[in-house]
Amino acid sequence: MSNPVYGKSAKPSSGIDPKNQISVTRWILVIGFILFLFWAPFQIALFNGQMLNFEKPIYWAVLISTLLMFLWIASYYKEIKLETQRDWLLVAVLLLPLTYVISLISAASHYLATNMVLIQCIYAVVFAIGVYILQSKQINHIIHLAILGISYVIVGFGLLNWLGGSNLAANLVGWFTSAVQNGKYIDAVMVDSNGPRLTSVFQYANTYAAFLMALLFASIFSLVRSNKWYGQLTHGFMLVPIIVSIMLTLSRTGLVLLPVVFVVLLLFLKPAKQILWIIYCLIAGAATVIVLNPITSAGLALHEQYSASTALNGWIYLIVASIAVAVLAWVIQSYAASRLTNGVQRWSDRKLSSLWIPIGSSIVAIIAALLLLFTSLKNILPDSIQVRLENINFNQHSVLERFTFYRDALKLLADYPIIGAGGGAWAALYETYQNNPYTSRQAHNFFMQYLVEVGILGFIIFMAFMIFIIWKYIRGYIRQSEQDRESHFLYFIITFSILVHSILDFNMSYAFIGMLVFLGFGGMAAVMDNKPLKKLSFKGAGIRYLYVGAVGILSIFVLFTSVRYLQSSYAAVDAQQVVQTSQDFNEIKTALDKDLSIRDTHPDSLLLMAEIYQQVYTQTQDEQYYNEAMAWINNGLEEEPYNKNMLKRKISLLQTKGENEQAFAIQEEKAANFAWDIDWYETLISQAFEYGYQALGNQDTAKKDEYFAAGLQAYQHVVEGIEHLKTLPEGQLQGRAFEITPAIALNAGKIQFMKNQSAESAATLKQGLTEDMNDPANQELARWYLASLQKAGQTDEQVYNQLIGTQPEADEQIDQLASLNF
């Protein structure tokens, strides 16, 4: 029996494109797939932003991928078998969306979970297509070029926005993307506390840095591998723009992980290739350092005000440096690379020869990093980049916050361990489990986020799928000749780079990035060390038709779902626009009905429908409108039990009808879900006093005590929360404000006053006082504070004098309050 070899089984089973004869159907599939890859990044990279604004491109991507799946079936149904490990991966990939379907059982948000099921279907399609088309040498070469070409366009698009060409960039892509608004691609240059940061199509600098890191290594690999002068010049030319773009993202995560990924990738190369990779990095890095300051300065100036001369100056620096590096790269590849390979051949033949350069480069990288961080060498960099480098440490807030996210994710997992809490679980539930009041609808770790979404069961399936492919690919890679192993190494570079970076960020929340990763899995599977499976080998046409039939039926279902969801999304957007221009109830309702007749729990439209019914009920007091509003909200909460806006709408609706007791019960019961929402607790404490005071007036002592106890319990939660925040590590930001607000101090102090806890009341009320005694709310606080002190036999002359100075009649009011007995 012959031994299996890399990319083939003992008995060839694929028979794909013999003699490079590619059918018309397959060409259509390849062209459609490439166009899909080009379209996707300009839809904000298909970001799963968990909001109405982001969903349409995702549904379009589902629709397009399903159509491509039909083309794939038509092209390859004769080759589909279930005989080898590679064949069974086409079955295994279906388990990934299936685990998300199973997690719908316990989904915290049915809306977000359903979207994730559809996104996983996109990935399964991309993987299946990749496995088959990339077995063809000719198609594989075309896909290589397409990936690099599209990526280079993305880099150019980003720099065009940085160097004053945002209007031109928008005009180039505005005809096929809704991400262009007011003549610009939204946040292609994002501004945050660090200043302008380059994001290109992603609107998020860290994910762009992850993409650029993968592209940098893919470009160097392609440069070293290319035998054509134009290929060498093209890839060499792009090195400086890529590295410049990485620096302009100001991404510390990217800068930290880039050398780590670089060293790991070097381990896969022969010493000659390792040396060439390092040379090109050094050349491009040196050229970048030379031009980085003027390019950065030009971009910052252009962000404030456009100047043709400033833009031209920036472009000249960039283009000249890129040309210089491209020419050097071409010279090295043409005249030095082969000599270098021959010169180190003996060394290459030695055992473990590929280890020494990565180890040495790691040491050099560490030394260079220390010099940049702790010496005047950092002065060669722009100020904004210097600041970011100086802040790289394990005690700075972004690192500490990420570790907090991960601990909170484990708490969430403990409550949903087996099948998880569904797609979007983190976004729906993080407020329930968070350690402090941060705001982050992403867990900043793909693997943690995946774990809480599908639980241990789904996570094991995904990890087994991923590890098996990578392990089989590496095993085959080691056994092959250097020329053969390079054919699909690009896919490993892209997938590995992105997944490593995704340990510290939410890159995979961009479906375009996920598509690249699963295309990478498909590329590796296409040539992995493939073996027949005797026990799971099914031959004959029957199994083929069974698999094709099952996939076809699922694809039809997904196709119709995507069409319906697209109709729903367009209707929801139209309804939002109608609300902006019309006050007519029937017109707004008609617009909303178009959406809700398709998806009756579509959150935005459902909330809007409930709101307009509530408004009409308030005006007419017609119970029919109240019942309709309540029915919509209750229907929504069945699918979205943690949706804060729906809960607030239900509370408001109950209060409108005078059902204060029920409203308060919800406010109190759901407080634990939003433990760090100070507005929620402020409202809860205020209502506890208001309803308790009403019960006191009605001489309902039991109800009064019940409301007052709830109010004080909520107040104590706030006090304990503030104390907990003091224990956060130095350098970690607490996030949203969480403090004793004047309203909390006033109402909690009143409750304590009415429970004859004068000293406690005074202490509580004092926390809300400000210097502004012209503010009526502060005057009320001061009156109750001074009355509490008076009742406790104390006084505060300073506050008393300030109050009397602006409100002389307050003296009598204080005495009246102090004389009250409860």
Image (cartoon, rainbow, N blue to C red):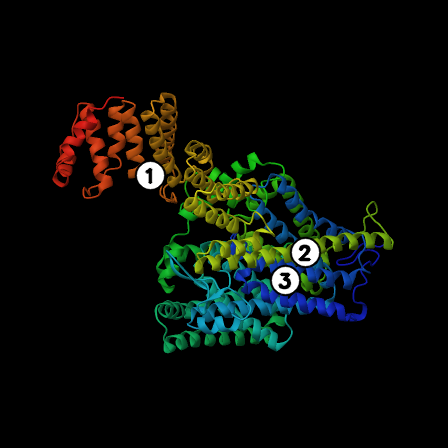
x, y (%) of residue 342?
65, 68
Q: Is residue 85 left or right of residue 39?
A: right
Name the residue located 39 percent from the left edge and 76 percent from the top edge: 313
**Picture quarter containing residue 197?**
bottom left
Give the alpha-carbon distance from disc 3 to disc 2, as whole Å.
35 Å
Tell me the kind of residue under disc 2.
Answer: Phe
Q: Nearer the viewer, residue 246 or 664?
A: 664
Question: Counting residues from the N terminus, which is met first, the one under dot 3 or under dot 1?
Answer: 3
Q: Is residue 418 above or below residue 334?
A: above
Q: How many marks?
A: 3
Q: Is residue 48 left or right of residue 16?
A: left
Q: Nearer the viewer, residue 659 or 755?
A: 659
Q: Is residue 472 left or right of residue 253?
A: right
Give the alpha-carbon distance from disc 3 to disc 1, as whole Å.
52 Å
Q: Is residue 204 visible?
A: no
Numbered disc 1: secondary structure:
loop
x, y (%) of residue 649?
46, 43
Q: Tell me if label 3 and label 1 are in contact, CB under 8 Å.
A: no
- For label 2, the residue is 560
- For label 1, the residue is 739
Label ID, residue 249: none
- For label 3, the residue is 490
The crowding category of the residue bearing disc 2, from other C-alpha atoms within 10 Å (few below 14, some 14 to 19, many at least 20), is few
Tell me the kind of residue under disc 1.
Answer: Glu
x, y (%) of residue 693?
32, 28
The crowding category of the residue bearing disc 3, from other C-alpha atoms within 10 Å (few below 14, some 14 to 19, many at least 20), is many
